[in-house]
Structure formats: C-alpha cells, structure tokens
Image (spheres, helix red, strand yellow):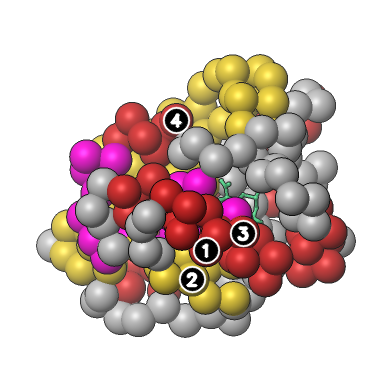
Amino acid sequence: MYDEAFWNERYANKDYLFGTEPNSFLAEHCSLLSGPVLSLSEGEGRNAVFLASRGLEVLGVDLSTVALEKANQLARSRGVEIKTMVADLATFVPEENHFGSVISISAHLPSTVRHRLYPLIERALRSNGIIVLESYSENQLLRNTGGPKDADMLMTVDKIRQEFQSFEPVLLREVEREISEGEGHTGLASVVQFIGRKKA
Ligand SMILES: C[S@@+](CC[C@H](N)C(=O)[O-])C[C@H]1O[C@@H](n2cnc3c(N)ncnc32)[C@H](O)[C@@H]1O
C-alpha cells in the first residue's frame, strides 16, 4: 500500500509535505554525527540539506523520484550539495564500512524489510558509527496526527532493542511530543527515539 506510486502522489504538490526544516530530534543531536551520512527514506530533502549545511557529506536514499527531485531543488536553493539515490530499501545494499552515521527519520518500513536492512546498516557503518532514528510508535495508532496505520511498520522500545542488539544504546525512549512538520506530520505524537553506536 505504501509503495512508490503512493509516495509520488503524496509528494506531487509543489509544497513540501513535511516542511523544509529538519526533524527536531535530529537537529538536537546532530553534533554526534560524522560523515558520510546515509539518510534512509530521505524524502524531500529537509534533513539532508540541514546536515549538508553543517558541512556533512550526505547520501539520501528514497523510493520516490518525485521526493528526491524536490530534495535536490531544496539543496540548490540553499546553496549546498547532497547526493541522492532512488532505491527501494527492500533491496538496497549500502557500501560496507563506509558511513560515519546513518539517520532514519520517519522511515517506517515493514518488519521484513527492516530485518534484512538493519544488519546491512551495521555493516555499512564504520566502528563507533552512530545511528539516529525517530519513528512513530505503535501507540501512534491511537492518534490521527500522522504515520502509517499498520502496527508492523511502527516501532516500540522492545523492537529497537531486538533489531539493534549489537549496538551500544546511547539513548532509547518512547516519548509523546508535539510535532510540526508541514501538513504531513502535525500535532501530538507518540514516537520512539534511538541513538545507537556501533561497537568498535
Ligand atoms: C514519512 S516520509 C519521511 C521522509 C523524510 N525522512 C522526512 O523526515 O521528511 C517516509 C519516506 O519513506 C519513503 N519510503 C517508503 N518506503 C520506502 C522503501 N521501501 N524504500 C525507500 N524509501 C521508502 C517514502 O518515499 C517517503 O519519502
């Protein structure tokens, strides 16, 4: 249901669906990141452009060609460079031992896709590399403020513990917070936030 056609249609409007400002959890913790940064499900570029403006090299991967065209447009308008790649995370294989950091902001994926991808993410990070993830939690199903209506695509603290077992957790919590990210995500939301470090 949440396939390329779904996302291309959602992004078809010239406005930025999730705004042009970075996710605030990412912005708060960006000093932990080193490059190159791999951004999973980058969307229309708000996070990649923010990180590039802080001097980081960023590769944004997304299923949607429409989203990545808008991401490149946003980068040009802000005078920064980002790299983008249209790819389905169900089959994407990141370069091994290459990235200083990975970000996963509202990159809601089915468990079958996550279970294949996350070990590849660990392999793609250098030693001590960092992952910063924010996802709607399963409790978000009780709200109408954004996110997929499918528990399998939503996270819990336990799912993170299971799926990132080999990482050293720097921060792991579920919180309720006000989100204001364009018309796509707006209002009080339940999210899981995770920062993990790949062990040396
Ligand atoms: C809620 S949006 C978040 C976009 C961006 N991370 C942000 O915070 O603005 C989810 C994104 O996931 C992308 N996506 C969904 N399934 C995907 C898949 N299998 N592979 C790559 N990208 C996918 C969509 O195209 C969409 O851009």
Q: Amino acid at mark 2?
A: Thr
Q: Quadrant of the C terminus?
A: bottom left
Give whichever of discs 4 and 1 has the lower sequence position: 4
Question: Magenta span has 127?
Answer: no
**Mark 1 Cβ inside 8 Å of ligand 1:** no
Residue at 66% in and 18% down: 188
Residues tagged 1 and 3 counted as in contact (Cβ below 8 A):
yes
Residue at the disc numbered 1 = 72
Classify 10 Å Cα crowding around label 2: few (below 14), some (14-19), many (20 and above): many
Q: Secondary structure at mark 2?
A: strand
Residues tagged 1 and 2 counted as in contact (Cβ below 8 A):
yes
Marker disc for residue 24: 4
Q: Secondary structure at mark 4?
A: helix
Residue at 21% in and 68% down: 126
Drawn side of residue 100 relative to residue 136, left or right: left
Classify 10 Å Cα crowding around label 1: few (below 14), some (14-19), many (20 and above): many
Q: Percent position (x, y) of residue 102?
A: 37, 58
Marker disc for residue 70: 3
The range drawn in magenta is 30-48
Spatial CA distance of label 1 from label 2 is 8 Å
96 or 7, nearer to the observer: 7
Residue at 30% in and 81% down: 96
Q: Amino acid at mark 4?
A: Ser
Q: Secondary structure at mark 1?
A: helix
Classify 10 Å Cα crowding around label 3: few (below 14), some (14-19), many (20 and above): many
Q: Percent position (x, y) of residue 106?
A: 58, 46
Q: Amino acid at mark 1?
A: Asn
Residue at the disc numbered 2 = 84
Where is residue 66, by image quadrant? bottom right
